Image (tube, rainbow, N blue to C red):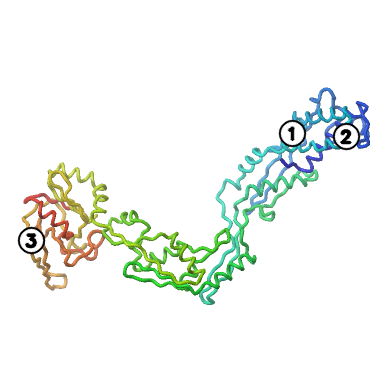
């Protein structure tokens, strides 16, 4: 591991001093060293007091170097070298080096070559990587929320019909490796200065962007984007078609941290979701099922779409993308409702017996049980809220009939006549019947603005099953 020049100098002089002392004492002569006195002092270490037979007398502490870290937002922190640099002169490794040098001197090996032994001190003594890493990790800079560094990017000017550069932003996220290297570099040039200052912003220790304002790389990317404004994207969603030119897609094009052009998926998603078919576009059938609505949906993979659209735009091509269609049926959503209401259904089953109809107005859903078995589970549309609400309570079937024309009066005083195939009354003129002749959507919040006159509108295929199985006097609970 690397070590400061100050500490290297101290170690080198200490070794030289010890070698020189014992070299003179042993009568060894050399052209590289001269006598240095009976008790020389090197960096505070009294070499003359060393016992050549007992190196335990070496006792020296080079002291702490204080490193001050100046961070953004007027924050300063300090670390001490004692947290990651060992007391080298007291260590057994240092003493072993001295012993080895003394032995070499006795064998007439030139001591000048032995200075290279400081590399051993570097690797085994002075710099403890784990301790330094722990010291760094305990700094506040690594334990608070940080602002990420954002590289230079582009923005589209719709009036000028061209892209222009926007500058990078250096955040407060510290690069660990850069900081460690800066600390070691500073110690190598310490020059006996026990106080070191590292300015994280000036010394570029914060994470730096790969793309910077004014760089040739950014200029090339802007030129590439400005030359790709003639593409045409078309999305076909069911019977709807949406044409997208550069006035729409140009702001979607951006540059990532690696200097690559990409199409912003979220902006494409916002466009499609805000289209007239947006409420029917999903990333999966499971996502659509969460709405618990019967519908025709369209699948989209935004990652794939972004990749294909990017290719077309950068090559100035025209491309048509068609979203695949799928259906959510009553049978798809019925198990979801049934599972959610299973506890209530079991309770009603115990209270009303093996056959019953349960209508939940809040969920706009109806269940029919016979012989303790679920026969029908279906969305329904009840009376329009705020004027024709379906009455709540416990009722029972009051007969049934087929091919009936329901008659009544609208709010404006006009008369209506609505022919139905299946009619099951349970509260005078209020009953369960099909409404497929005039209604294509059941469930959800339709009843709030386009409900019935009080009856329970039911898909024909579902009310048919109820009609064919329901008994006279079957209880009907409306909540």
Q: Position of residue 306 (x, y in %)?
A: 46, 63
Q: Verify CB contact (< 8 Å) between mark 2 and mark 1.
A: no
Secondary structure found at label 1: loop
Depth check, front residue: 224 or 412: 224
Mark 2 and mark 3: Cα distance apart in space: 118 Å
Q: Mark 3 = which residue? A: 402
Secondary structure found at label 2: loop
Q: Position of residue 469 (x, y in %)?
A: 10, 51
Q: Mark 2 = which residue? A: 110
Q: Which mark is residue 27?
A: none
Residue appearing at x 79%, y 40% in the figure: 8
Mark 2 and mark 1: Cα distance apart in space: 28 Å
Depth check, front residue: 325 or 392: 325
Foreground mark, 1 or 3, reads 3
Q: Verify CB contact (< 8 Å) between mark 1 and mark 3.
A: no
Q: Which mark is residue 87?
A: 1
* Left or right placement of residue 48 versus residue 176 in this view: right
227 relative to 461, above or below:
below
First of labels 2, 1 by sequence position: 1
Residue appearing at x 21%, y 62% in the figure: 385
């Amino acid at each position: 591991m690397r070590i400061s020049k100050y500490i290297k100098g101290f170690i080198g002089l200490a070794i030289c001093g010890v070698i020189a002392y014992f070299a003179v004492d042993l009568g060894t002569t050399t052209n590289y060293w001269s006598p240095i006195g009976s008790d020389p002092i090197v960096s505070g270490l009294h070499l003359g007091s060393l016992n050549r037979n007992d190196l335990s007398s070496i006792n020296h502490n080079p002291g702490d170097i204080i490193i001050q870290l100046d961070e953004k937002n007027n924050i300063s922190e300090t670390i001490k070298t004692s947290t990651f640099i060992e007391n080298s002169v007291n260590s057994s490794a240092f003493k072993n080096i001295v012993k080895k040098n003394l032995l070499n001197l006795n064998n007439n090996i030139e001591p000048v070559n032995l200075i290279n032994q400081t590399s051993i001190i570097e690797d085994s003594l002075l710099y403890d990587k784990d301790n330094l890493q722990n010291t760094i990790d305990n700094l506040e800079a690594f334990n608070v929320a940080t602002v990420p560094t954002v590289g230079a990017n582009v923005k589209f000017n719709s009036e000028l019909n061209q892209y222009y550069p926007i500058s990078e932003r250096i955040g407060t996220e510290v690069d660990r490796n850069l900081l460690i290297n800066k600390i070691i570099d500073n110690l190598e040039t310490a020059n006996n200065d026990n106080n070191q200052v590292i300015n994280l912003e000036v010394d570029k220790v914060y994470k730096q962007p790969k793309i910077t304002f004014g760089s040739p790389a950014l200029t090339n990317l802007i030129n590439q984007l400005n030359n790709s404004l003639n593409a045409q994207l078309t999305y076909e969603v069911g019977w709807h078609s949406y044409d997208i030119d550069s006035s729409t897609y140009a702001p979607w094009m951006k540059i990532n941290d690696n200097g690559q052009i990409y199409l912003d998926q979220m902006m494409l998603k916002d466009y499609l979701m805000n289209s007239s078919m947006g409420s029917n576009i999903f990333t999966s059938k499971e996502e659509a099922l969460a709405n618990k609505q019967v519908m025709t949906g369209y699948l989209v993979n935004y990652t794939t779409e972004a990749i294909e659209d990017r290719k077309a735009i950068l090559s100035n091509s025209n491309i048509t993308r068609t979203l695949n269609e799928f259906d959510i049926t009553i049978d798809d959503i019925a198990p979801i409702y049934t599972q959610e209401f299973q506890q209530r259904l079991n309770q009603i089953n115990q209270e009303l017996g093996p056959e019953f109809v349960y209508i939940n107005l809040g969920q706009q859903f109806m269940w029919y049980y016979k012989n303790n078995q679920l026969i029908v589970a279906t969305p329904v549309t009840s009376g329009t809220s705020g004027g024709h609400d379906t009455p709540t309570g416990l009722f029972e079937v009051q007969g049934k009939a087929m091919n009936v024309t329901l008659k009544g009066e609208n709010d404006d005083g006009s008369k209506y006549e609505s022919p139905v195939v299946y009619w099951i009354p349970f509260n005078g003129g209020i009953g369960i019947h099909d409404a497929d002749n005039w209604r294509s959507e059941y469930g959800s919040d339709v009843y709030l603005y386009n409900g019935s006159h009080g009856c329970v509108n039911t898909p024909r295929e579902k009310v048919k099953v109820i009609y064919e199985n329901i008994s006279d006097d079957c209880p009907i609970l409306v909540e």
